[in-house]
Amino acid sequence: MELETVFVRQLDLSRETEREALYDLRWRVLREPLGLARGTEQIAADPDPATIHLGAFVAPARLVGCATLVRTGGDLQLRAMAVDPASQGAGVGAAILREAAQVAANANVRRSLWCEARAHAVGFYQRAGWVVESGPFEVPQIGPHYRMRLSLPQPEGPG
């Protein structure tokens, strides 16, 4: 599937239009198919100023993908990643993962990005270099997940 040029940038949730677009996409992709109510797409870390929200856009500024990065010690957790079904398979998710890795490097994340991937998405993450590091576990109301990690290049030390 070919898609227009995708660009990924940080979202500003203080802007109502961006916040509502993010929540709507998360709900449509991640919660509505499971029969979950509106509001369940919001996560506790959303309003934290240290939380980074990424949005993938195609012209004319249409949000087609998103992910949230939450600092956990020396790592960042990738959460609530979603791609509009009409844009899946067109490189949107891969563009988000590349930007997440770049954001992590720029934020001096020392070790890795990690996530709790839905079972059906494990292959997608593996193709992007992520490694499964747990057996399957159940997330209530959502389904089976695996913990996955992407090791980040370490800066070279002196001498």
Image (tube, helix red, strand yellow):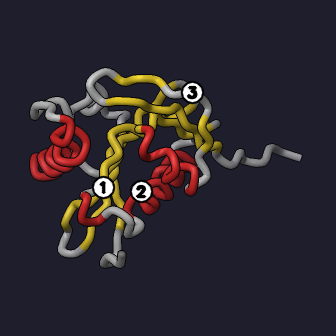
**Point 20% across, 68% down: residue:** 61
Give the label on residue 135, or none: 3
Q: Which residue is mark 2?
A: 96
Residue 159 is left or right of residue 8, and the answer is right
Asked if 3 appears above or below 80 in the picture, the reply is below
Q: Secondary structure at mark 1?
A: strand
Q: Can you give x and y, in whole percent of width and height, for residue 151 in the image? A: 64, 43
Can you name the residue that lies furthest to the right here? 159
Quadrant housing residue 87: bottom left
**Point 57% across, 56% down: residue:** 127
Q: Residues within 10 Å of mark 3 (few under 14, many from 20)?
A: few
**Label 1, label 3: how many angstroms apart (C-alpha)?**
25 Å
Q: Secondary structure at mark 2?
A: helix
> Do the residues under discs 1 and 3 have CB atoms within 8 angstroms?
no
> Do the residues under discs 1 and 2 have CB atoms within 8 angstroms?
yes
Q: Secondary structure at mark 3?
A: loop
Say which amino acid is labelled 1: Val
Give the label on residue 20, or none: none
**Is residue 141 something one can see in this rendering?**
yes
**Point 38% across, 37% down: residue:** 79
Q: Which residue is mark 1?
A: 83
